[in-house]
Amino acid sequence: GKVVVLDFWATWCGPCVQGLPKVAEVTAKLQEKGVVFHACNLDESKEKIEKFLAKKNLSISVAMVGQELAGKFGVNGIPHTVVIGKDGVIKKVHVGFGPGSEKQLEKDLLEVLGASGEEKKEPPKGEKPAEEKPKDAGGK
């Protein structure tokens, strides 16, 4: 029943180091609206992650994941952020991080939060649901 944001990252990745605090900030702002954030670290040790988080003064949930799981989300490069709607379907994918990325993420999250309540409406009895065009998932 929540919108989930998974951010695949590593401590050695410059754009990840730049983006992770911003993604954490955006998702924290929307936590009360039902957004949950998990930073998914790729193949690094718990000690290295803890040291990094302490140095950056970040208090976030980190899942330690391998390439196999990351691949299931289409991760070929990092940072790679996946927004999953309340229905469990991937709604948005952001690859990379640059100026304005956090604004786009916030816009996308607000869109997914707003849309998720309407997506499950049933068509009136005897009518077929309208065909939907597939949503862009970052070219995947």
Image: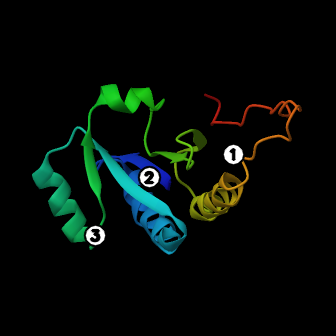
Instruction: Estimate the x, y position of residue 51 in percent, counting from the top left.
Output: 15, 62
Earlier residue among tags 1 and 3: 3
Residue nearest the observer in this picture, 126 or 45: 126
Question: Could you say which disc has been placed on residue 15 in the image?
Answer: 2
Which residue type carries mark 1?
Lys
Q: Residues within 10 Å of mark 2 (few under 14, many from 20)?
A: some
Q: Secondary structure at mark 1?
A: loop
Q: Does 59 appear above or below 90?
A: below
Which residue type carries mark 2?
Pro
> Which residue is at 65% across, 56% downward?
108
Q: Secondary structure at mark 3?
A: loop
Question: Could you say which disc has been placed on residue 103 in the image?
Answer: none
Q: Residues within 10 Å of mark 3 (few under 14, many from 20)?
A: few
Q: Does 95 appear above or below 11?
A: above
Q: Secondary structure at mark 2?
A: helix
Q: Quadrant of the C terminus?
A: top right
Q: Which residue is mark 3?
A: 59
Q: Which residue is mark 1?
A: 120
